[in-house]
Amino acid sequence: MARSEAQKRADKKYRETHKREAVKWETWLKPAEAEEINAIIKNSGMNKPDFLRWAVSELQKHSNGN
């Protein structure tokens, strides 16, 4: 079902209001590498943003310990 003009305006207003709350951050991986990483993340119970936050905290721990 197509979105009404009012829904489209509401969507646009929402995007404009919240566009500074998050930044899309991405990279390119080989398909096999992406599948392996995704499986590891999923098996750990995390999602991609959680994994990135965890990885950064681990790097910070190791860099502060040196």
Image (cartoon, grey):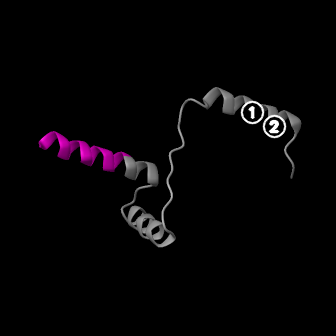
User: Residue 24 at x, y = what percent?
Assistant: 54, 43
Secondary element under disc 1, as helix, strand or loop, is: helix
Query: Residues in magenta?
Result: 53-66
Q: Which mark is residue 12?
A: 1
Q: CA distance from mark 2 to mark 1?
A: 6 Å
Q: Is residue 65 above or below residue 32?
A: above
Residue on which the image places disc 2: 8
Q: Main secondary structure of the magenta part?
A: helix
Q: Which mark is residue 61?
A: none
Label 1 sits on what residue type?
Answer: Lys
Nearer to the camera, 17 or 32 = 32
Q: Is residue 17 above or below residue 51?
A: above
User: Residue 39 at x, y = what percent?
Assistant: 43, 68
User: Residue 51 at x, y = what percent?
Assistant: 38, 52
Q: Is residue 9 left or right of residue 42?
A: right
Nearer to the camera, 50 or 32 = 32
Q: Looking at the image, which residue is at 47% across and 73% down? A: 32
Q: Looking at the image, which residue is at 48% across and 62% down? A: 29
Quadrant, the C terminus: top left
Q: Is residue 6 left or right of residue 46?
A: right
Secondary element under disc 2, as helix, strand or loop, is: helix
Q: Looking at the image, which residue is at 65% across and 26% down? A: 17
User: Residue 23 at x, y = what percent?
Assistant: 53, 38
Q: Is residue 42 above or below residue 13?
A: below
Q: Looking at the image, which residue is at 87% across and 40% down? A: 4
Q: Residues within 10 Å of mark 1 (few under 14, many from 20)?
A: few
